[in-house]
Every structure is written in structure tokens, then in C-alpha cells.
Image: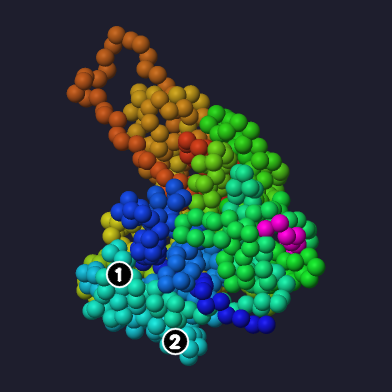
Amino acid sequence: MTLKRDDIRNIAIIAHVDHGKTTLVDGMLKQTKVFRNSEAAGERILDSNDLERERGITILAKNTAVHYQDVKINIVDTPGHADFGGEVERVLNMVDGALLLVDAVEGPMPQTRFVLRKALSLGLRVIVVINKIDRKNARPEEALNETFDLFIELGASDEQAEFPVVYTIGMEGRAGYAYDTIGADLSPLFETIIKEVPPPTIMEDEAMALLVTTIEYDKYKGQIGIGRLHSGVMRRGMSAMRITPTGERSTSKIDYLFTFSNLSKQEVEEIKAGDILAFGGFDEIGISDTITDPLAPVELPPITVEQPTVRMTFGVNTSPLTGREGKTGWGTSRRLRERLYNETRSNLALRVEDGESPEKFSVSGRGELHLGILIETMRREGYEFEISKPEVIFRRDPETDELLEPVEEVHVEVTDNLVGTVVEMLGVRRGRMIDMSSEHGMTFMRFLVPTRGLLGFRSKFLTATSGNGQLHSLFYGYEPMAGAVPRRQFGSLIAYEAGAATTYAMLDVQQRGTYFIAPGDEVYEGMVVGEHIRPEDLAVNLCRTKQLSAVHTKTYFEEERMRGVRNMSLDDFLEFIADDELLEVTPTSLRPRKKTLNNELRMREVKRREKMLAEQ
């Protein structure tokens, strides 16, 4: 028997990066009386992860629920960056509708296209929310027209193209049905959700079935699975069967059962189909697992996500300083392998394979940011390891056997006077311009650029535009190789011997480049301590001390002063390291190094490679 649950609405909030998803959720939580004191609740309430707060982006999908006029609205806040598309793809399986946020100034952006395409393909009812209409140069009518064009371009059905529109000022928690008549609160938004988003349709008489879309871990309750109950009733204490995507089956009890309410989980005895819930009781739970009744098992179709495009190697830390800064025993290959493979259970867009040796693992993801967040998370947990330079994943055309490479659609926004600079920079990296327009002194451009050309490009772009340009990329597809892409222009300064770096030695060679280390830092042979001013590498001795002598060779006024050290972040180092270098990652330090630490062996390898190239 088919029923509709009018007391529930399940929605996701989707948008481009920084278009105000999390801020709008803040307003919805505050206005539904989730907090006794709305002023003390703070901002970006759902971005609880330290990395999310530091970077100002949503990385992990979050579940919450609010109550409005006797209707429970389950809300899923999703990431806006395409590198975390795996999060978006799996949580959209839980909902019946979506709020698509569009900035009133910027209009639809690259990630808007990505998340909207996913929502439309699943047949979700989409409500368009034109946000930030109080911004200077806001153009709500144009933003709405561009959004409609995007719906048509992505193949929306007639019903999907007739979407409802709400205008909001997310920071103030206000909404309206027209951009020039904004109400005092978000009531128009809540009413539109209840009216337009279809209530969940359930099969009351069918066996219990749920598809796991998110995993959490509780140190007391173990693994917690989250998903939407598709059919039947789930009760605490009942027997349940877990069916993995590969067909493996196991049986256990539902020991814990929660429903979402406001910002917390509430333990309940029973949940009916249509609601989003969390449960515990199985020793192991994986995303895409079906939890069902063992007497009448139902296997739900697994979640599919797009394939990764960038790969790097994770390995056991082999530097002379290994074991000093990480947690004891957390740097072993067994521990590292266990951590990486566990990540793939909740991070669907990630791929992990055993490497060429037991100490190395090949890790593939959606982009530099996707892998960078994993690295930063692991080092904060206490792991230490080494990683290689990111590289793109190539494919072969099954018909012609031609080598293909991933290509991204790049959207650039810069002031008119910087257009030439950006066009030249992307042209050198094999980028092809496909569109350009100018408005209010700003130029908007679209390029198709090989992913190879974008590795390490973002920091150079920000430098060239003095931090004022905007660059967003979206996976476009695979195309034939576009030719050579320029590599790093300058070589590395390499430590010649182990010891503590001295001011005396560093002053003596500081004209040769820029340092990544400060006087007193410990270095080892083969460690990269700076960037050379020439294309080739240079080994420097930074551990020399001044000979004690009564002879003064310089006066006070002739003495050089130590220049500032270049502070490099994880993202900077991922862009900087060369093919023959690794990055040593520990909870407190990031140290680039050569793969071959011994200077003499490394020089022999360089000469041998040069000789082979000359003979070819």
C-alpha cells in the first residue's frame, strides 16, 4: 500500500562555494527556536570540523532537522566544491527536493552546474533561492534568467523548469517572493518548501530497507550508519541483514536507533519509512550497504560516483627524522594502510590501491583539494608519512588506443586590465578559451584546460591577480593529449649534510635562493631547504659554523642581514615539489626532500638520465 507522509519533507541545500548555504541553514535553525538564545549560537553552526572553519568551506555533508507548523524538515547541508562531489552524489539519494542557492551578483557558477546536474538526474524538485540580494551590484533578474537557461541546458523536464523562486538575505535571515519585497523572517522559504517539495512516498506493507549514505563513528557505540528508510519500519532490538554492494551478507541487531531533531540525534524505539535516521549495531558498516529485513531481504541499488582524476603515492616516512613527531606506532605501513582503506568506506570518491612495495599506497581523488584535505586530516590525527607529487590519471581510448587526459572547464573572473595576463598564463598551459564577456569593469572567461596544466596553477594565478581574481574549475571530460605543459621554473636548494642550520652558513648562501627553514632548524642530507634562483638543483651546506679567530674580515656595517623565511602551507608544497621529490608530513612539520637522499648517488642518477636523453 502506497502512502505519502505529509508530516515530513527531506531536502538538500546545494550551491557553488561561498554562495551562503551554511549561513542560510544558520537562519533556519535560529528561527525554528533550536536555540534558547539565537545571538549566542554563533555563525556557520554546521561547519563543526576545524578544517571547515579554517578554510571557510563545507567539506562533509551534515544532517539536521527543524520543525515548522507540525512538519519536520530534514535538511542536508552539502559541500559546494567539485572536489567533494562524492559527498553531494551520495546524500542526494536521501532527499526528495533541493534548495539551489544562487548568488544575486555572480549568478550560476561552475559548481552550480555540477550540483544541479546531479539533482535533476535524480528527479528532485528544485527550489531556486536567489541569495545575497542586498549586495552591491546585485542583479536578481539576470541571475534568475541565467539559472533558467542552465536548467534548460542541463535537460530539465518541463516540470523541473517551472521551478519556484524565493529571494533571501541569508545573513539577516529574511526571505520574500519578490526581490523588492523581503519579509522580516524566513517564513516564505519554509512555506515554499512545504508546498513544493513532495512528501516521501512509502510502501507501508513492504519489508524494511535502508541504503547507507553516510557513516559516523562513536567511541562508545561504534560505527553509526545514516540513511533514509525506504520502506517498512525499523525498530530498536530487531534483527537486520547487511548486504554489501559486492553481495556479502551478515546479520546483526539494531542496538541503537536515532532520528534527527535540531542539531542533535534523539534516541527512539521505532522509525517509519520516509524519515532520515541513524542506527548502530553492526561491527562494520559501509556506504552503499543495504540494511534490510533478514526474513524478506530487499537489495537497493548502490550509489555510483564519478571516477577520480588525480593520483599521488602515500608511503611510510623514510627520512632520518622519522618517529620524532607523530604518535608512537602510527607511522607503520600496517597502520597507514588500515587508515587509508578505512577512509574509502566513507569517502566514495577516493580510491586506494597497494603500491609497488608494502610501504607505499596509490591514492586517487577528485583533485588536489580533495587529497589535500585527507592529508591534513591524517596529520592532525597524529600520523606521519610521505607523499609524492600529484599526477593526473590518463586513460586509453577503447577504440583507437589513443592516450586521453582529463580536461577541466575553468571559469575565471578578473578585472579588465588583467585579462591579457590570465589568457597568456592559461595559453601556455594548453588552455582554450571558449567564452568571454565583460561587465562593470570585470571580465568573465571560460577555458578548457588539461588537468595537468592546473596542477600548481592556483597559487600563481592568485599572485598574478594580487589575490583579487576568482578561479573555479569543473571536470569536463577526457580528450587527446594537448602537448607539453611547462614545469617548475626553478630548482631546489638541498641540504648537503645533517645537523642544525646556522645563521652563519645560511647568510653565506642566501643569495642563491629563498629559504623554507629558519636558523636552528634541524636538516638532513637530501632535504629541500629552499628554492634556487636557477632551474637546476643546488646542494648547500647550512651547518657550517664560524671559525673562532681574532681577525675581522667584515665591519659591522658591511654585515648582511638574514632575509625572511618563506612560509609554505601544505597546498603550497603540493604545488612546489618536483617529480623526484617527496613531502614528509608529520603533525608538526612539512619537509620536502629528494627521493634519493644521498647527494653522490643522486648526482650519478642525474648524469645517467642526461646521458640517456642525449643518446636519444
Q: Considering only order in the chain, which callout, 2 or 1, is on the residue closer to the N terminus?
A: 2
Q: Quadrant of residue 113?
A: bottom left
Q: Which mark is residue 348?
A: none
Give the residue pinned by disc 2.
161
Whether residue 444 sits left or right of residue 117 in the image: it is: left
Say which of 503 and 554 sits in front.
Answer: 503
Residue of label 1:
185
Image location (x, y in percent) of residue 199: 53, 78
Q: Quadrant of residue 568?
A: top left
The three-letter code of the residue at mark 2 reads: Ala
In percent of the image, x 59 and y 72: which residue is there? 274
Residue range corresponding to the magenta coloring: 236-246
At horizontal 57% and vertical 68% (from top left) the residue drawn is 275
Q: Residue furthest bottom?
A: 158
Quadrant of the image occupied by residue 204: bottom right
232 and 91: which is toward the camera = 232
